[in-house]
Amino acid sequence: MTPDGSEAPAERRPLIEHLEELRGRLWWCVLAVMAGAGLTYAARESLLAWLLAPVGAVVFTSVAEPLLVELKLAAWGGVLLGSPMMLWQTWKFVSAGLSSREQRLVNWLLPVSLILFAAGAWVGLTRLVPLAVRFLLSVAGEQMLPMLSVSHSLGFVGSLMLACGVMAQTPLVVILLAALGIVTPAFLLYHWRGALVGSFVVAAVVTPTPDVVTQTLLAGLLVALYLGSIGLAALLQPWLRAREITPQAPASGVVRPAPLGDPQRGSPSLRCSASLVPPAAGHRARSACAAAGPDGPPRGAPGSRP
């Protein structure tokens, strides 16, 4: 902190030190992903049974498909299990360049983001995937026998889980924007029609299948999260202001300038400055104004007040 209360700028370091630090943190991220991939591959059979339970029995259509599916599962598991370490290393690398206010935001933003992603993925696996599979298989009728490929089924389940996890970040994004003073709950509620259309557009992009039912389920989830986040932002707004996270404008919205001059010695409009005296007033008037100073005539001079 500087003597005037502002934050002192961070000490600059050479570029080579930043690159060395970045290399060390990247190694930690790689080790975390490899450890997560190893744990996922060790439990691959149980994980496949758990993930494919909403789909049912699956088949493979090539000799190498089971191995490729297990390696893909291990890779995704490594990224997910290693994401806390990757986020932590990223935070340690960039935190030195952030202010204390921004650090306070990130300190509670990262854990909440991980929890919301896990909750969204869980809802997608246990709620949306069974509904989507049940509808899509009911369209086939009795004439067609389902033979679901293990790779396509796992990709379908993983895509829905990822989409639900990403959409679960909606409350966090809304609260963050409200905390920074960019939007307000009233503003978001006023533009609910645009949010409704945007939800269906996002659902159409992230849905792994072109059917309308799955898109509607995802859009409905996104709209519910949007409306819920508006209420949550309205409830948390006093708490954010109390912790000095949200900048609060003056009550009138107008910053009033300080009065000019000394109110005990005359009107503020009577302050004298030699630069404000017009040239037509003459040299004597400008000299007298300059001798009087910015606060008017000195005490005891003609025209001054006792």
Image (tube, rainbow, N blue to C red):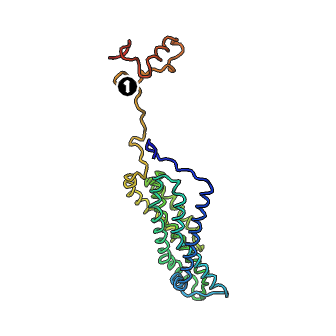
Residue kind at label 1, given as amino acid type: Asp
Query: Could you tell me which quadrant the C terminus lies in?
Result: top left
Check the image and name the residue furthest to the left: 306
Name the residue located 50 percent from the left edge and 20 percent from the top edge: 276
Residue at the image point whose x is 47% and y is 21% from the top: 273
Q: Nearer the viewer, residue 143 or 232?
A: 232
Please state the horizontal and vertical placement of residue 136, each as a whole percent of the image. 56, 80
| Looking at the image, residue 8 lies above or below residue 226 | above
Q: Is residue 233 visible?
A: yes
In this image, 238 relative to 289: left or right? left
Front residue of 300 and 278: 300
Q: Is residue 239 left or right of residue 102?
A: left
In terms of depth relative to the viewer, which is nearer, 224 or 286? 286
Binning the other alpha carbons within 10 Å of mark 1 as few (below 14), some (14 to 19) or many (20 upward) gives few
Q: Which residue corresponds to the image point at 59% horizontal and 68% vertical from the top-left?
A: 27
Give 20 or 174, whichever is nearer the viewer: 20
The image quarter containing residue 302 is: top left
x and y, in percent, of residue 181 in the image: 46, 51
Percent position of residue 52, x then y? 54, 83
Residue 213 appears in view: no
What residue did someone put label 1 on? 262
Find numbered disc 1 in the image and state the secondary structure of the residue it sits on: loop
Q: How many marks?
A: 1
Q: Is 198 situated above or below 135?
A: above
Q: Is residue 174 above or below residue 152?
A: above
